[in-house]
Amino acid sequence: MAAPTEPADEADRLEGTPHPRHASILVGHAQAEQDLLEAYRANRLPHAIILGGPPGIGKATLAWRLARFILANPDPTSATVRGARDLSASDETRVAAQIASLSHPDVSLLRREINEKTKRFYTEIRADDVRRTIQLFQRAAGAGGYRVCLVDSAEDLNRSSANALLKLIEEPPPASLFLLVAHRPGLILPTIRSRARFLRLQSLTPSEIETVIASLGAPWRDESPANIAKAAAQARGSVHGALRLINAQGLELDALVQRLLQRLPTVDWREVHRLADQIGGRDGEAGFEIAMTAIHDWIDDCVHRGAASQSAARLVPYAEAWEKVTANARETDALNLDKRPLLLTIFSDLAAAVQAAQV
């Protein structure tokens, strides 16, 4: 299916790439796909599924692929479903066209929406967004099949919207399916997690990432093969990560951030200021994403390494740093603030976290 030619204001789409609902192929996650297909065939599909894993590995692509398949094949006992090898569905169907245009009457997408006043994305999925979704589940499915709510991503729910969604998930109407894309599933409301099946998706291999990049077409596949291979190798299993690193400037910027993080709690403020100058201003958005991805990955690594060798108390500073970094970054983005002061604050907070964890 061809991607839209005009850019769209979509918080859940990486700029310069098609939205996951337009993807015709799924790279990786074959076992997870087969598990979902078998569950649908056996009429045992959970009413709520959390698809967890790092950003950019295909979680949303699999969620949309499942939604398109079951809406195009509402009878799980049909010959088409019994003979299916995977969850692929024709791009030529009315269902595919409706999903591509977000006009399917039985599908609701919950994500951060655009603020028409500021022309920036809201920092959260609001309770009002969930209330509109509730209306979908108050009426019968138009095609007599499933009604699907897809959340991308679940971490963007605030407390009010999460509780509103919980009420739906707790007492779901018949033939309801809630698909929650989650980059950090531990941040999902525990009562929601307890009522959903958790499906953890693994990071992609470098060769799988290269396959995805080749499928995106120009300008991505026109990059140097050496840069594509290097970006795929350094992207920690994420297509999004590879696309941000794919040119020489991206690789150099990532290397600078990694050096600064490895030196903590010592901070080379001269280098931090140099990094801040590179990602500040209107032209530094891509660099800012590279830096924030590296920082979040570094915090995750600290937590995972520490979980095996340290007391829980020593992990608290990293958890607090993650929350503070995330909140400050979202506020900076929502208010369109200068990112340079934010980066200086982040490295100060990270240094403090490392020192506190070492006590």
Image: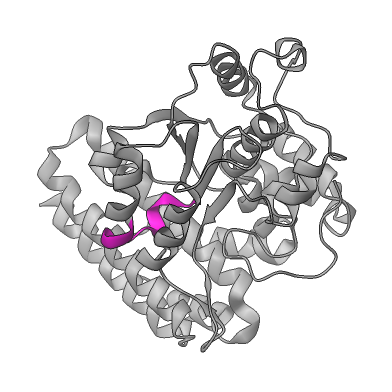
**What's the colour scheme?**
one colour
**Magenta stretch, overall SS:** helix
For residue 279, what is the image quadrant?
A: bottom right
Depth check: give the residue in front, 283 or 170.
170
Image location (x, y in percent) of residue 110: 49, 56
Depth check: give the residue in front, 141 or 203.
141
Image location (x, y in percent) of residue 217: 87, 51
Q: Count up the numbered dots.
A: 0
- Determine if the magenta segment contains residue 90: no
Tell whether 72 sits left or right of 116. right
Tell whether 155 sits left or right of 266. right
- The residue located at (69%, 67%) in the rendering is 249
- Determine if the magenta segment contains residue 158: yes
Image location (x, y in percent) of residue 321: 26, 61
For the magenta stretch, what is the residue range? 152-161
The answer to whether residue 136 is visible is yes
For residue 23, what is the image quadrant?
A: top right
Depth check: give the residue in front, 158 or 13.
158
- The residue located at (77%, 16%) in the rendering is 80
- The residue located at (58%, 79%) in the rendering is 278
Image location (x, y in percent) of residue 335: 44, 85
